[in-house]
Amino acid sequence: MRSSWRAYKPGATTPAAGSATPVAAVMRISPGGSRRILGLDPGSLRTGFGVIDCRSGDLSIVAQGCIATSGGPLADRLRVIHAKVVELVEQHRPEEIAVERVFLSKNADSALKLGQARGAALAAIPAALGVHEYAPRAIKLAVVGIGGAQKTQVAHMVKQLLRIDLRLAADAADALAVAICHAHSRRLEPFLRGVGA
């Protein structure tokens, strides 16, 4: 199965009815119209965000940056995250939200703060918007092709996929990677529905 896409030849004959669809053919499936996606990489000190437009499979950047809290009490930082995410949604009007799923951490205190920051960001999202979660490894796999990729590799591939030459903060690059991961997942949905997955 892993080598099937490498062996796929675009000029080859069409497979017979009932045979498996080549994986490479999935990329030609219409993604179901244009969508604006807001990607979030929550953190108690810095929350990265990235907004992209996905039109007919083409990705373009709309906005990127970080919500930087000034330290201090955690409650104040959570209020800042919540308020800024509300502003982002109102300003850019995304149709879908993609968020990095919480990963397990050996440091319970850090994991707790991360979870609260994530909750503050999610609480700012209107109920009408769909929220999609992706594990860090799945995001790296979708963007770089390696589940254990380094942050520099993720940032490099984000620039290549969006065709930009900007200096991206690590948190902003991660947020854009989350949005790109969701855009790729959307392209697979028609195929997965077609095979009954």
Image (cartoon, rainbow, N blue to C red):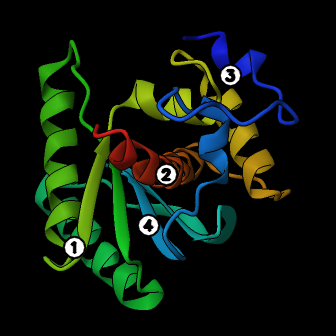
- The residue to which callout 2 is attached is 175
- Location of residue 91 in the rendering, given as x and y in whole percent from the top left corner: 44, 89
The crowd level at tag 4 (other Cα within 10 Å; few <14, some 14-19, many 20+) is many
The crowd level at tag 1 (other Cα within 10 Å; few <14, some 14-19, many 20+) is some
Q: Secondary structure at mark 2?
A: helix
- Report the amino acid beneath label 2: Ala
**Quarter of the image where the C terminus is located:** top left
Q: Secondary structure at mark 4?
A: strand
The crowd level at tag 2 (other Cα within 10 Å; few <14, some 14-19, many 20+) is many
Report if the CB atoms under discs 1 and 3 are less than 8 Å apart. no
Q: Tell me what residue is drawn at x 76 percent, y 15 percent.
A: 7
- The residue to which callout 4 is attached is 38
Q: How many marks?
A: 4
Q: Secondary structure at mark 1?
A: loop
Of the numbered discs 1 and 2, the one sitting upstream in the chain is 1
Of the numbered discs 1 and 4, the one sitting upstream in the chain is 4
- Report the amino acid beneath label 4: Leu
Q: Nearer the viewer, mark 3 or mark 2?
A: 3
**Quarter of the image where the N terminus is located:** top right
Left or right: 108 as drawn, with respect to 52: left
User: 196 or 52, which lies in front?
Assistant: 196
126 up-or-down from 57: above or below:
below
- The residue to which callout 1 is attached is 125
Measure how far apart labels 1 and 4 are at the Cα level.
10 Å
Left or right: 135 as drawn, with respect to 144: left
127 up-or-down from 147: above or below:
below
Q: Can you tell which mark lies on residue 5?
A: 3
- Report the amino acid beneath label 3: Trp
- Location of residue 71 in the rendering, given as x and y in whole percent from the top left corner: 31, 53
